[in-house]
Image (tube, grey):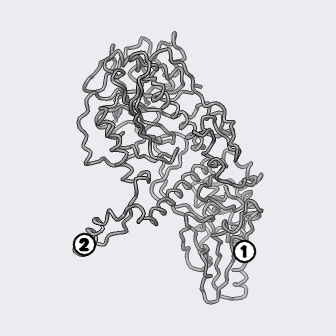
């Protein structure tokens, strides 16, 4: 199987009308399909520059905007290395076998920092984490079962003590599973209700029932969309009741309740859960978590709860009442993800990452954990408003106060998001104006390039577990993509494979199905600018190569550089037309256009090419660089 990545290249407009910067466009994260052609005109250039603040989960830093001051160096005139057969480099990340000297985490060799050490695991020994306990064997074997992995989120929810509330979005079309949310993520626990119907019991309420009845309800799946395997449910249930301290605490609450009912005593029962246990003792180091170390049943004659900061679960006769679980609670992960924390181990804390791989559940966990990170950052900003120069906005505050007196307007709380918070309006405006300053100095960009991740890269494929899909390892896929993007930037910026680069900007986005890609604008030095059809043809092709003289390149174009098939989920507009204007018109020569996009050479072919049920010609080919596609195994568009 081919291991190339998409690379599309287009030559932008020669003349750009002035862009109005006083009215900035709305922030929008574009999503494009793996096989959709990206072209750029006046409006598209604005869109790309406006998107420069998209949160890059690969680095958690601002998108890079770099302007390079290049020295006069020896070069072959305005000939592009990437457009000649002299450039024959084949870039690979190598083996995933290099280890950190401190925590023994695995790395690629290229992931070393400027100090020649690995720092993206334990910060070069600055963070010390005890090893995870071995995962229970009776649960481990379940993750080899296809039915279990397909429904792993449902199994987890059936045994969870806390719920995760959010608005999930299913991407259109077919493809690998992607966990995608919109809006806030919150966690809730509910009181134990003694008089609701069994069909309405969920989460912690199920542990209040007899095991047989609870497992029957879990396997029937009233709270899920599918019926679960009863034998699998029994295996998980047996382990949870024997080893999970939260399950044991709920069972103890039930026993105390039944004893009070037998003695005809009407007392307030409450399960309170220790929310500070991680600061008291390192459970990973000193042994298994005991039920009485994290939870206890409190009996009150006057109904008053204990004076502490614990989580409270009341046992009452009325309907279920939910309480929000603090996102920084050390119990949050253990109560929400019992299949990741089957022994009730302390969960996520700032700077802590989980090492287990559990398919769709891993995707949900990663999204949930990153939202907690952002919530923690926002909490810091909220508590430190005086330190981020809030006084300069005092005029705005005075205006809102005066409006409140005039029209009885009640303003909400005012918080200033600094430009250091990725995604904030100030970060967006700062990046936008930085990019526009490059346009002011160097004029229009010369090349618009898209670099797309390929899930069958050998660095990804060779390091997945058996029966594991790349969509279940977004963390690893992003690491590989980041390293390859870094090498591509070195080619463009330092090795000048497309000519002397004087400036570039790029933004990283994630497609609808989870794969990252980067859009890049490149400014070339005057002598290397693309000013005629011959220069375009040296750099870009939009045709199938000859299958006799270039069989490998021909196959790469068939696999990676074809647009379509056009579907509503990909590119069809409301009128059923391709929004990317494919197929393109055929023509014998490249037409250089000084006031718009060039029309690429797309000659008719004698024998149509059949791919599955499709018949395609050069009109469907996405523009590409042949040398990069063939020699470096990177596909740029």
Q: Secondary structure at mark 1?
A: helix
Q: Which residue is mark 1?
A: 252
Q: Quadrant of the C terminus?
A: top left
Q: Count how many numbered circles sit on residues in the image.
A: 2
| Label 1, residues with CA under 10 Å away: few <14, some 14-19, many ≥20 | some
Relative depth, front residue between 8 and 613: 8
Percent of width and height locating residue 622: 42, 25
| Label 2, residues with CA under 10 Å away: few <14, some 14-19, many ≥20 | few
Residue 244 horizontal side relative to residue 607, left or right: right
The answer to whether residue 574 is visible is no
Q: Quadrant of the N terminus?
A: top right
Percent of width and height locating residue 232: 71, 54
Q: Secondary structure at mark 2?
A: helix
**CA gap, disc 2 and disc 1:** 57 Å
Mark 2 vs mark 1: which is more N-terminal? 1
Examine the rendered structure and indicate whether residue 121 appears above or below residue 6: below
Q: Which mark is residue 402?
A: 2
Residue 408 horizontal side relative to residue 612, left or right: left
Q: Nearer the viewer, mark 2 or mark 1?
A: 2
For image coordinates 36% across by 66% down, the residue present is: 414
């Amino acid at each position: 199987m081919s291991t190339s990545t998409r690379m599309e290249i287009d030559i932008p407009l020669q003349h750009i009308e002035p862009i109005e910067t006083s009215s900035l466009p709305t922030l929008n994260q574009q999503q494009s399909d793996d096989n959709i052609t990206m072209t750029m005109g006046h409006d598209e250039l604005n869109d790309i520059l406006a998107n420069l603040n998209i949160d890059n989960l690969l680095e958690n830093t601002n998108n890079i905007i770099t302007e390079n001051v290049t020295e006069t160096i020896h070069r072959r005139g305005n000939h592009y290395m990437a457009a000649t057969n002299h450039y024959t480099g084949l870039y690979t990340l190598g083996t995933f076998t290099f280890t950190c000297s401190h925590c023994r985490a695995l790395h690629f060799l290229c992931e070393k920092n400027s100090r020649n050490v690995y720092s993206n695991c334990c910060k070069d020994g600055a963070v010390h984490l005890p090893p995870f306990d071995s995962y229970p064997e009776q649960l481990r074997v379940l993750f080899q079962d296809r039915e279990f992995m397909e429904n792993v989120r449902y199994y987890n929810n059936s045994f969870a003590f806390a719920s995760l509330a959010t608005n999930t979005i299913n991407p259109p079309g077919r493809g690998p599973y992607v966990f995608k949310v919109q809006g806030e993520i919150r966690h809730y626990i509910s009181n134990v209700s003694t008089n609701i119907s069994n069909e309405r019991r969920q989460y912690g309420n199920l542990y209040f029932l007899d095991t047989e009845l609870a497992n029957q309800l879990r396997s029937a799946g009233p709270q899920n969309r599918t019926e679960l395997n009863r034998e699998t449910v029994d295996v998980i249930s047996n382990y949870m009741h024997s080893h999970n301290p939260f399950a044991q605490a709920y069972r103890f609450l039930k026993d105390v309740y039944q004893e009070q009912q037998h003695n005809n005593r009407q007392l307030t029962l409450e399960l309170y859960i220790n929310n500070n246990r991680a600061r008291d003792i390192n459970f990973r180091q000193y042994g298994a978590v005991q039920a009485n170390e994290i939870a206890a049943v409190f009996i009150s004659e006057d109904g008053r709860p204990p004076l502490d900061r614990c989580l409270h679960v009341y046992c009452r006769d009325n309907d279920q009442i939910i309480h929000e679980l603090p996102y920084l609670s050390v119990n949050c992960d253990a109560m929400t993800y019992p299949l990741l924390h089957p022994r009730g181990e302390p969960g996520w804390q700032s700077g802590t990452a989980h090492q287990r791989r559990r398919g769709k559940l891993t995707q949900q966990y990663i999204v949930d954990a990153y939202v907690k990170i952002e919530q923690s950052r926002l909490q810091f900003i909220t508590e430190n408003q005086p330190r981020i120069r809030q006084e300069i906005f005092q005029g705005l505050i005075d205006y809102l106060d005066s409006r409140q007196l005039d029209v009885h307007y009640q303003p909400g709380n005012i918080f200033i998001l600094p430009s250091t918070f990725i995604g904030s309006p100030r970060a967006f405006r700062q990046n936008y104006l930085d990019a526009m300053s490059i346009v002011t100095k160097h004029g229009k960009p010369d090349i618009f390039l898209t670099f797309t991740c390929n899930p069958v890269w050998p660095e990804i494929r060779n390091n997945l577990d058996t029966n594991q899909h790349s969509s279940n390892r977004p963390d690893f896929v992003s690491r590989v993509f980041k390293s390859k993007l870094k090498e591509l930037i070195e080619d463009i910026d330092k090795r000048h494979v497309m000519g002397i680069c004087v400036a570039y900007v790029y933004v990283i986005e994630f497609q609808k199905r989870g794969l990252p890609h980067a859009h890049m604008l490149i400014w070339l030095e005057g002598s290397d600018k693309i000013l005629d059809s011959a220069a375009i043809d040296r750099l870009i092709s939009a045709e199938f190569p000859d299958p006799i003289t270039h069989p490998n390149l021909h196959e790469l174009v068939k696999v990676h550089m074809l647009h379509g098939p056009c579907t509503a989920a990909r590119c069809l507009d409301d009128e059923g037309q391709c929004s990317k204007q494919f197929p393109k018109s055929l023509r014998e020569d490249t037409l250089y256009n000084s006031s718009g996009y060039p029309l690429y050479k797309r000659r008719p072919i004698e024998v149509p090419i059949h791919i599955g049920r499709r018949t395609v010609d050069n009109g469907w080919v996405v523009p590409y660089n042949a040398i990069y596609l063939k020699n470096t195994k990177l596909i740029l568009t």
